[in-house]
Image (cartoon, grey):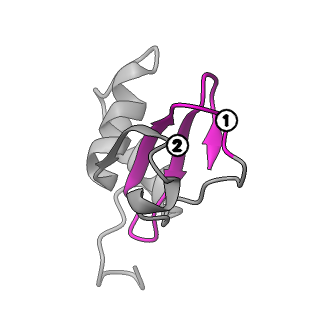
């Protein structure tokens, strides 16, 4: 997982969702995105999951140019390692 600061972590789940969590204290073992909340033995301040589509929207929205003009789809493609506007089932997607 990616550590920002103050024990705040972000991790990509297998389905593209992103786990956001903060620990009360520095971990003794580096956390993994697929770890269940119980793995943190009471050291968890909060934990939530952001769906992949929402994460792409967050990335685009907080960028300087925002979501307009297809930038949401570009962010989604970047996050999912696909081509922008690629539709599943078409063109090998």
- Taking the image as shown, residue 76 lies to the left or right of residue 7, namely left
Disc 2 to disc 1: CB gap under 8 Å: no
Outermost residue, top side: 64
Say which quadrant the C terminus sits in.
bottom left
Q: Nearer the viewer, residue 15 or 64?
A: 15
What label does residue 86 carry, if any? none
Count of all numbered marks drawn on residues in the image? 2
Of the pair 6 and 87, the residue shown nearer to us? 6
User: Which residue is label 1 attached to?
Assistant: 26
| Residue 20 quadrant | top left
**Where 8 sits versus 85, above or below?**
above
* Residue 23 in picture, x, y percent from top left: 52, 36
Position of residue 49 in the picture relative to residue 27 (left or right): left
Say which residue appears at 30% left-offset and 77% top-offset. Answer: 88
Residue span colored magenta: 1-27
CA neighbours of label 2 inside 10 A, class few (<14), some (14 to 19), many (20+): many
Task: Pick whichever, 70 or 81, lies toward us.
Answer: 81
Q: Position of residue 86 (x, y in %)?
A: 36, 66
Which tag, 2 or 1, sits closer to the chain's start? 2
Query: Horizontally, is 67 left or right of 32 in the view?
Result: left
Rendering coords of residue 51 (x, y %): 28, 53
Q: Secondary structure at mark 1?
A: loop
Q: Position of residue 38 (x, y in %)?
A: 41, 61
Q: Could you tell me which residue is drawn at 72 percent across and 49 percent down?
A: 28
The residue shown at (30%, 37%) is 57
Q: Circle 2 is placed at which residue position?
A: 10
Rendering quarter of residue 52: bottom left
């Amino acid at each position: 997982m990616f550590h920002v600061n103050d024990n705040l972590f972000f991790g990509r789940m297998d389905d593209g969702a992103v786990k956001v969590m903060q620990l009360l204290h520095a971990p003794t073992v580096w956390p993994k995105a697929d770890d269940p909340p119980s793995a943190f033995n009471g050291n968890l301040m909060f934990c939530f999951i952001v769906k992949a589509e929402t994460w792409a929207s967050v990335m685009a929205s907080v960028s300087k140019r925002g979501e307009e003009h297809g930038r949401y789809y570009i962010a989604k493609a970047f996050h999912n390692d696909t081509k922008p506007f690629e539709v599943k089932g078409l063109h090998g997607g």
